[in-house]
Every structure is written in C-alpha cells, then in structure tokens.
Image: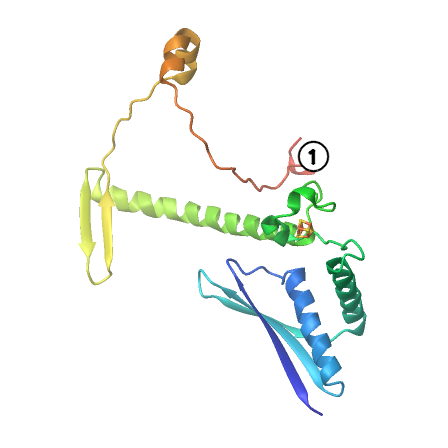
Amino acid sequence: MRSLGICEVKTTSQIPDEPYDSWVTQLYWQMGLAKLAYPEANIRGTILAVDLNTGDIREFNGFTPSEVIFDMLIDKAHNIWAAVNGESTPDCEPSLLCGFCEFREDCPVFNRDNLPEDVWKTVHLFAQLKEQRDELETKLEPLKESILKYIGTNKFSATNSDLGLTVTVMAPRLAEFVDNKRLKEELPDIFEQYKQIREYPASLRVYHKKTKSNGGE
Ligand code: SF4
C-alpha cells in the first residue's frame, strides 16, 4: 500500500504550544483531498511551524485523515462557493485573521466581546512569554548589581574583543520636570499655552485575574 505524508508548513512570529485551529483545518483539507486522489494510500499529516524571528522549528504530528471533518469542510466550501455566486450569505467564523479583514466593521459575526479560541491561545502564549521575561528580569537584576558594584557608577566604557562585548555605564544624572498637576491648577493659562498633545499607541495588558481564593477581590 502506498504511503503519503502531507506537511503543512506555517511561518509565525511565535510558535504556540498547540497548533492553531486554522492550521489544523488546512491540514485536514490537504489530507482529505489526498485521500480522494489516493483512496488506498496510508496518509499521515504533520504541521511544521517555523518561527521567523528565532529560526526555531516545531513539528506537530500524528494527524490522519478524518471523513467527518473533511465532510464538514466540503459543506463549508459549498457554502463559500454559493456566497461567491451571490446565492447565500457566508457562514463566517471569527478567528485571529479577522484582525486583517477589511470587512470587519460590517461583519455580522465579528464580536470583540466573544474572543475566538485562537485569539485566546495567542493571549495565553503572550502571558507565558511575559512570565518568562519577568523571570529573566529577576535574574538580570542581581547580575547588573554585581557588575556595577565592581565598575562603579561613573561614566565608563570597555570592550572585550574576544567576547565581542562592550560594557558601558551611564553616570547618575538629574532630570528636571514640571509638576503638570500643580501647573494646571495654579497657572492654567500658562499650562494651556505650553501644553503639548502626544498620541500614544494602544497598549495591551494580560494578567491573571485575582479571585477570592487567591487573595484578591
Ligand atoms: S471579520 Fe468577518 S468576514 Fe472578516 S474574516 Fe472575520 S469573520 Fe470573516
């Protein structure tokens, strides 16, 4: 019996712990189509995720064709084709990709208050990496203190060409600033005359919500 291996290659900026649903769906498509072409073949599928920033590669394997899933995907394809021909409205499925969709404002199923699974997976990945970063920062701080203890806090620069490293120290400095709150209260005209408006990009916070059982509200 002929054996066939299907490999779905995905490039990403961070490899998740589990493959995204859209990746898995695409693999089931490929395996289902291969099964139609080679019904007798022993078909196996794998997803190869490549992190474009770090060069890391991770394989998610062990997939085999599923008639049930393939039939669902065929129904979906019929639905899309009918929608393309103006015969029906598409059964849209919100996903992370909605972030790039130009029809989002009018889309009947896009809903910020009900995040799809792959968005939650990305939030989870973000939280895990943030925890790793926090752990690293905790380890970096005592190293920094040890180095500064030796070198001192005056302006300094040194290079080790064998290691290809340069270390510099910026001496402590004073910064002047204006107390905006007081200026606005006590000299509002001056505040208005000199104020500048700066736009900051949206910020994102991901954190573990405190519950009564872990000491929170
Ligand atoms: S916003 Fe709507 S139309 Fe656009 S990708 Fe998401 S579900 Fe599809």
Instruction: Look at the image and name its color scheme.
Output: rainbow
Q: Is residue 23 above or below residue 176?
A: below
User: Looking at the image, how many numbered discs can be counted on the residues?
Assistant: 1
Q: Residue furthest top?
A: 186
Can residue 64 be seen at all in this image of the molecule?
A: no
Mark 1: amino acid: Lys
| Residue 171 x %, y % | 22, 36
| Residue 74 x %, y % | 77, 68
Q: Residue at x 45, y 31 (%)?
A: 199
Mark 1 is surrounded, within 10 Å at the Cα level, by few (under 14), some (14 to 19) or many (20 or more) other residues, namely few
Q: Quadrant of residue 183?
A: top left
Q: Residue at x 70, y 40 (%)?
A: 113
| Residue 161 x %, y % | 19, 60
Q: Is residue 133 above or below residue 81?
A: above
Q: Does 17 sit left or right of 85 as displayed?
A: left
In front: 9, or 79? 79
Can residue 197 be seen at all in this image of the molecule?
A: yes
Q: Does 159 sit left or right of 192 as displayed?
A: left
Q: Secondary structure at mark 1?
A: helix
Quadrant the N terminus occupies = bottom right
Residue labelled with disc 1: 212
Q: Is residue 123 above or below residue 186?
A: below
Q: Is residue 201 above or below residue 188?
A: below
Quadrant the C terminus occupies = top right
Q: Residue at x 51, y 68 (%)?
A: 57
Q: Residue at x 69, y 34 (%)?
A: 212
Q: Quadrant of residue 72?
A: bottom right
| Residue 39 x %, y % | 76, 85
Q: Does 145 sit left or right of 77 as displayed?
A: left
On whether ligand 1 comes within 8 Å of the CB at mark 1, the answer is: no
